[in-house]
Structure formats: C-alpha cells, structure tokens
Image (cartoon, helix red, strand yellow):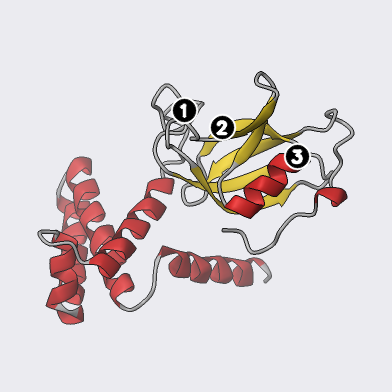
Amino acid sequence: MTSTLLDPIQLDWSKGAGLLPAVVQHWLTGEVLMLGYMNANALVTTQATGHVTFYSRSKQRLWTKGESSGNVLALKSIRVDCDADTLLVQADPHGPTCHKGTSSCFGDDVRPAAGFLAELDALVARRYAERPEGSYTTRLFEDGIRRMAQKVGEEGVETALAAVAQDDAALLGEAADLVFHLLVTLRARGLGLDDVAAVLAQRHAERSAH
C-alpha cells in the first residue's frame, strides 16, 4: 500500500463538481486498467482500506471495485497531477478488472509488451519465496547459484549461435530462455529486473550528460 497519503484538502474538487477522474494503472506492467471517479470520501476510503474505491455516478454512492465479483484492486500508490485535479492510481489487480473478463476495461491488448517482464520477475520472486513442488524454477533455486550461472552461460552461447546461424524464431526462443534464467540468477542473489533497469538508467543519464 502507498506510504504517502494524499490530503483531500490539497486537491481541486471544484472543476468536476466534487469528483476527480482516477486513472488506474497496473503497478508492475504499466497497463491502463480502467477510469473511475473519486470524491473526497472515496479517496479517504481507498487510502484507509487499501482497496481502490470510487464514487459511482450511476449508483450515487461509494463503490469498491470488486465488492461483488471479488476482483479487487489492491492499492500500491496514488499520485495527483500538476493541476491537482486528476489522480493516477497504481494497483495490483486480483483478477480481471473489466466486467467482461478482460484484464483492462480497454481490452486485453493495451499492456506494453515489455510489461510482461515485470510480471515474470514478480513470479520468479514468488517462486523463490514459496518454492512450490514440481516447479522448474524451484529446482533451479535448489540446485544453487553455480547451476544457475551455468544455465545463463549455456543460454548465452545458444543465443549467440542462433543470431548468426538460425532464423528469427530460433533466436527469439533462445533469447527468451536467456532472459528467464538471468532473472532466476538475479533473484538468487537478492536482485531483480528493477535493479538492472536502475543501472541502465544511470548509465544513460551519465552518458547523456556528456
């Protein structure tokens, strides 16, 4: 849940007759899940309970997403825009967000392609913590860091060979294997995709400054 609470008094409720649009985004993938509206009570309830709550204009009452379906939106963070009249809510969806069964109210094809890597990284982290029986990822963790490092080396070589001697499908397949085993190896060292992205971002910033 978000660690910094928004103070309703500091927001501009006048433009929308006491309502602010709230864009809900998947906290890992960046996928836009839905658009709702909050009044001050909905904002307070969202921050107090950790479940995203809106003001329903049709029902004329507070409405917690998933109150009937169980597909709640667990609050991760909430931000306000520069004009203090629009909210950006980052949430962890427990099930499909749309009543039609899609992950997003805008369809299933709005998630950024790279966003799946964040979901995969989170899954690898859960496998590391839970160690479910029969999982290939569990077996890798239990085999130890040397075995994981060996797999990264093997997949790296196979990816390089595919790049020079095989078709695009083979290259993509080997690259996918390499990325997966790299994520597992990073997790075994207590690291994840965000840490790699931070290093790349820092390098980019340093080079852009020159």
- Closer to the chain start, of discs 3 and 2, is 2
Q: Mark 1 points at which residue?
A: 98
Q: Image check: 153 left or right of 31? A: left
- Closer to the chain start, of discs 1 and 3, is 3
The residue lying toward the viewer, choosing from 134 and 187, is 134
Quarter of the image for residue 24 reads: top right
Q: Where is residue 5 in the image (x, y as percent from the top left)?
A: 71, 58
Q: Is residue 83 above or below residue 145?
A: above
The residue lying toward the viewer, choosing from 81 and 101, is 101
Q: Label 1, label 2: how many angstroms apart (C-alpha)?
A: 8 Å
Q: Name the residue under label 3.
A: 86
Q: Is mark 2 on a helix, strand or loop?
A: strand
Q: Where is residue 40 in the image (x, y as percent from the top left)?
A: 77, 42
- Closer to the chain start, of discs 1 and 2, is 2
Q: Name the residue under label 2.
A: 34
Q: Where is residue 88 in the image (x, y as percent from the top left)?
A: 66, 44
